[in-house]
Amino acid sequence: MKNIRSWKFRIYPTKKQEEHLQNYLYECKNLWNYLLDYTQKYYEITRHFPTRSKLYELTKNKTQLFSQVAQNVAERILRALNGVISRKKRGIRVGFPRFKPIDRIKSFTYPQKGFCLEEKLRLSEIGGIQIKKHRNIKGKPKTLTIKRMSSGKWFAIFTSKHIIAPKHNNSPKVGIDLGIEYFAYLSNGLSIPNPKYLKKG
């Protein structure tokens, strides 16, 4: 059975690297607002939302972001629009997603490529960042989200898929019959006394 799990680590960017990370948040904000403005105007004319491929195309040459980070912003727009459609189908009155100021953008995501975790966390176009890797990640990291907390601390959040072997109980099978005088009777002849927690309480 495959399990998806998140792994959160503190990172310590240099002052110059922090400027790069802050700039990425700023660029994500600008791209979100640009794509949302295009979507609103497109909807007013066609009464339809733009396609994923069209939003992906709009991310090109519009920002200094790594390409996959920019595409992830487009994905966030699409998820927000799908939420609008879903709520409207349920009869809920809802408007368009909102334009965002810089303080509403706290993270950006590498959905597949652009990062590598070794002794340091290496980000495309930013370089190696010190990371406190206090445990090993199970499975291969699939995505990476860089997040700035309100405290000013930076964190790297990975997701990975790893296989969990199901646990097998090799004990003999037994039937259980719940009772009143006894809590349970087992098919092997044993019985479990009634603990009478309510009476004791």
Image: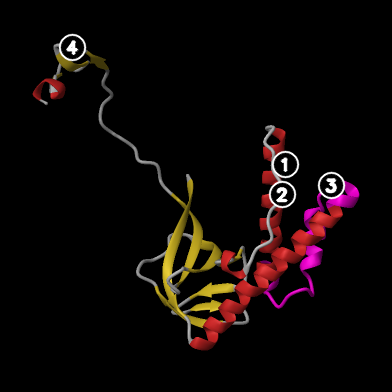
Structural crowding at the residue carrying mark 4, measured as other residues with C-alpha within 10 Å and reported as few (<14), some (14–19) or many (≥20): few
Q: Earlier in the sequence, mark 2 or mark 3?
A: 3
Q: Which residue is mark 3?
A: 48
Q: CA distance from mark 2 to mark 1?
A: 6 Å
Would you name the residue on which mark 4 appears? 180
Q: Are marks 2 and 1 in contact (CB under 8 Å)?
A: yes
Q: Amino acid at mark 1?
A: Ile
Disc 4/disc 2 C-alpha distance (Å): 56 Å
Give the image location of residue 150, x and y in percent.
46, 68
State the image quarter where residue 75 is shown.
Answer: bottom right
Circle nearer the N terminus (4, 2):
2
Q: Name the secondary structure under disc 2.
A: helix
Q: Nearer the viewer, residue 117 or 90?
A: 90
Q: Position of residue 28 (x, y in %)?
A: 66, 69
Q: Residues within 10 Å of mark 3 (few under 14, many from 20)?
A: few
Q: Indicate which disc residue 85 carries.
A: 1
Q: CA distance from mark 1 to mark 3?
A: 11 Å
Range of the magenta residues?
43-68
